[in-house]
Amino acid sequence: MIQYPILEKGATIGVTAPSSGVPIELHQLLNSAFKSMEKKGFNLLSGETAWTQDKAKSASAKKRAEEFNKMMLNENIQLIIPPWGGELLIEALEYIDFESLQIKWVLGYSDISMLLLAITLKTGIATAHGTNLVDLRGKYSDDTTAMWQTVLSTKRGDSILQHSSEKYQKEWQHDMPTPYIFNLTEETYWKSTGNEKVKVQGRLLGGCIDTIRHLVGTPFGDVQNFKEIYIKGDSVIWFLENCELSTTDLRRSLVQMKLAGWFENCTAIMFGRSSANTPVDNYTVEDVYKELSEELQIPILYDIDCGHVPPQITFINGAYAEVESDNGQGIVLQTFI
């Protein structure tokens, strides 16, 4: 059975960096995010790692894990939000005390999604794939991003509905700041390999494929064990997003996941928008999606609101979801059962 944390008003948020922290020259971003969250009524408790960064990590693997473990054990903290992602979270996994984790939300994406997926697979505790802390520093959030708080406040047994965004950000325009951080200029349009209406249901699992693929074959990526213990054979909907991979690297990663059994009893795979997916020898990402759809005999949705091309829907690892997509628009109904 999946265990769902719940976020209450006035909660204390723990800020720690199990991957990358914020270097000194960008501390104003973190300070701004703290002020914004405090205006929303939250209390914030920051660890040391959030403010340090060197050699592609916030601190040593042991220090990162130790700080995370302490925040998970701190009964005053209801939610942990890292500043952002990074590169080397995988180093800290072996030092995280999964057996002692308390039932509280961890929210993030990018490299953080490796930790999120590992927690849900090993413990059955739901985790939240969505915005990071630094992107909550605006005066307000766009409608899609803002749903994180409502989603995390959903009670066990209840459902929460989210819609595809109206527009997304194609590129950062730092010389044109907006009150909600993102420069939303492009029309959102969800696509499917069959160019037809898609309606699927199953348990959500996923994250940034660049990082979560490295859980394959480790004690932190036992999808089969998770299915047997926590969701009793329910089907799975995977949500994935590509940060930096070429089409051939993406294809290799997906085949590896397939060969490892990750896509068994899978009803659909959803891919977020990406500025990567660089074609190799005329091999496009659409080719990758089409081949995967044909091999697994399931629909593939792509260009959805997930990942490094914001805004993002808040997807809950472990939640039961009904996903529909038609004419470029999508809805995601998640039920906490």
Image (spheres, grey):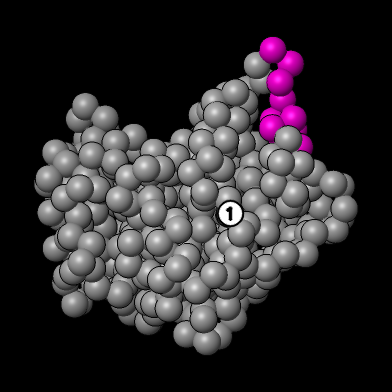
Count of residue discs: 1
Residue 251 seen by the camera:
yes
Rendered residue at 32%/51% (across/down): 220
Front-most of residues 139 and 95: 95
Front-most of residues 137 and 16: 16
Left or right relative to 243: residue 286: right
**Residue 176: % across, % down:** 57, 37
What secondary structure predominates along the stretch shown in magenta?
helix
- Residue under label 1, please give it: 264
Residue 198 lies in magenta, yes or no?
no
Residue 314 seen by the camera:
no
Rendered residue at 69%/12% (across/down): 281
Residue 289 lies in magenta, yes or no?
yes
Rendered residue at 19%/77% (across/down): 75
Left or right relative to 296: residue 128: left
Rendered residue at 62%/45% (across/down): 272
Under mark 1, the amino acid is Glu
What SS does tag 1 mark?
loop
- Over which residues does the magenta segment extend? 281-290
